Amino acid sequence: VATDRGASLLPSWREGDARSAILAFVERVTSSGSAGFVPPAARIAVFDNDGTLWSERPTYTQAFFVIDRLRELAASDPALAARPVVRALLAGDLHGAFALGADEVGDVALLAHAGLTVEEFATAATAWFASAVHPTLGVPFTRLVYRPMLELLDLLRAHEFRVFIVTGGGVDFVRAVSLDLYHVAPDDVVGTAVDVAFERRDGVVHLVRQAALGRGDVNEGEPKARAIHAHIGRRPILAAGNSAGDREMLEYATTGAGSTLGIVIDHDDAEREFAYESRSATDPGAEPILETAVRLGWTVVSMARDWVTVFPD
Amino acid sequence: VATDRGASLLPSWREGDARSAILAFVERVTSSGSAGFVPPAARIAVFDNDGTLWSERPTYTQAFFVIDRLRELAASDPALAARPVVRALLAGDLHGAFALGADEVGDVALLAHAGLTVEEFATAATAWFASAVHPTLGVPFTRLVYRPMLELLDLLRAHEFRVFIVTGGGVDFVRAVSLDLYHVAPDDVVGTAVDVAFERRDGVVHLVRQAALGRGDVNEGEPKARAIHAHIGRRPILAAGNSAGDREMLEYATTGAGSTLGIVIDHDDAEREFAYESRSATDPGAEPILETAVRLGWTVVSMARDWVTVFPD
């Protein structure tokens, strides 16, 4: 039965309410003849990335990628180097950078890789992931994925779920490593998109990144639910997140007909990862997601109590 | 070898240049060790829908769906029934309707299903496909898919290609039947999207269709290439289309590195389907796609000469 298969597939999860809720959900959804059965085609699961599948502290992984690129550009561009927001970012002063305005940070973030073709960007992102190391944990960023969550993705796929990543991060940044890190194909990643221009150069078509967002908004909050529809076309039956920016996506998934499961990761493990209250990136005044989870009956996963191990060996 | 497998998989294709080009391409791409080998993860194939996978005459299938809905709405909405564009559409006078302005037609088309949740729309589309019959051919629209193209999709999937539909039509309309007709999952359909609003009703989230286009433009021309990147994230190695609106998508696919194939369907079979010169829906002055195909070395498929049969039995 699903539960037994699950037990062997979730070795990094401790016995407890969270693990039980996940296994019971998978059992219910996949037991033909049961009231909660969901046919495979409708087994859509969506996962936030930053803070849900990989670590997001002291800030989003992509910020380090952008800062490294700005450092390169600033070396030969004095005007860029002189911009206060760039100086703050290059000094590692994220608080100071954001104090100059989130728009200002967003502008230089978009500027950092503007002008690259989408293939050049993918190459740059792949190269960066191959060498970049987390500033305080001292390990490659690619090692900072949550092992229990990788097991959960595998468990779902073993039960004919389709697994999608729905991130507020840059879709092309995450796509560069989604297959390697999560076994999620690039086309199964939904995220914030940068505008691209269609250019012909000597007869060859290139899509060139612009210093502006593309289709859709920053992929947080309601846009996440709308992007799920735009990209996937079906309502998920499982959604997992860790911040108020994931709330609407979880509400969308868990208020559909039939069996559903909402999962919220609680970052309460200062020893093995970080302890913090997740906040919406776009709406700092939003209800904390842990309160929403309790109110709406979602499954809260305590990193400290529910996970035997946090990161891969 | 691939060619032999292909021979048994393309029974509706006559011996000839088009069939040979397709089989040679599949052979080249899938032969490990050959110079043209492409690893499975990069075997992305994109297909236009109207006029490439199913018939588009006398007009797009979706237009009949919209007109049937407008007829329902007009029965209880005298103001709508009195609009000249609606009167023309309900009288089957497409030429007269478009003479009032493409924007006017677009407006009522968007209006037709505005206010429906995405689930209600999917149900309506599925129900319509179950009963609607082509006005001159007298068979269900679902029978007007091209059998040789279904065989091609199967051939590609049998050789570890990922097959996507990239349509100028409404993405949610095509998604309603993509799995049944083409064995293409809804999330592997890219098309023109309608804006949806995020609404909570008694605690349940609904995404409600608005009378406006959503993310991106009408999915024709350059937007098709950009949408491929936004949705799939990789450059295709095979693209098939039949109108000038598919040109940029074919250029994007066929100017990438390595083995590529561009396919253009020539509607030259008045007896079994329709004979017409395909034009861009959004740019009537564009170079005819058959001329582009010759100029850029794409494979032209003559429906009259290359296909043993056009439709399924």
Image (cartoon, coloured by chain):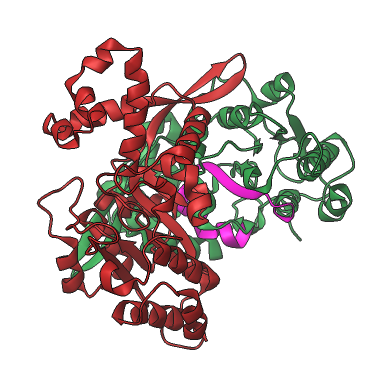
Chain colours: A green, B red
Front residue of this view, candidates B32 and A193:
B32
Residue B309 location (% of width, % of height): 38, 67
Would you say B235 lies left or right of A19 here?
left
Q: Is residue A84 visible?
A: no
From the viewer's side, name the closer residue of A133 and B6.
B6
The image quadrant of residue B251 is: bottom left
Nearer the observer, A261 or B124: B124
User: In the image, is residue A155 part of the stretch drawn in magenta?
Assistant: no
Is A27 situated above or below B109?
A: below
- On screen, residue B78 above or below B102: above
Task: In this rendered view, identify the residue nearer to me: B184 or A138.
Answer: B184
User: In which image quadrant can residue B246 be found?
Assistant: bottom left
Q: Percent x, y for residue A256?
A: 63, 29
Quarter occupied by the C terminus of chain A: bottom right
Q: Does B90 sit left or right of B235 as displayed?
A: left
Where does the image place residue A296, in percent across and percent down from the top left?
70, 21
Whether A179 is among the magenta residues is yes
- How many marks the image carries: the answer is 0
Residue B11 image-quadrant placement: bottom left
Residue B204 visible within the image? yes
At 68% from the left edge and 32% from the top edge, which residue is drawn?
A: A276
Q: Position of residue A161 (x, y in %)?
A: 67, 49
Part of the protein shown in magenta: A157-181
| B72 relative to B222, above or below | above
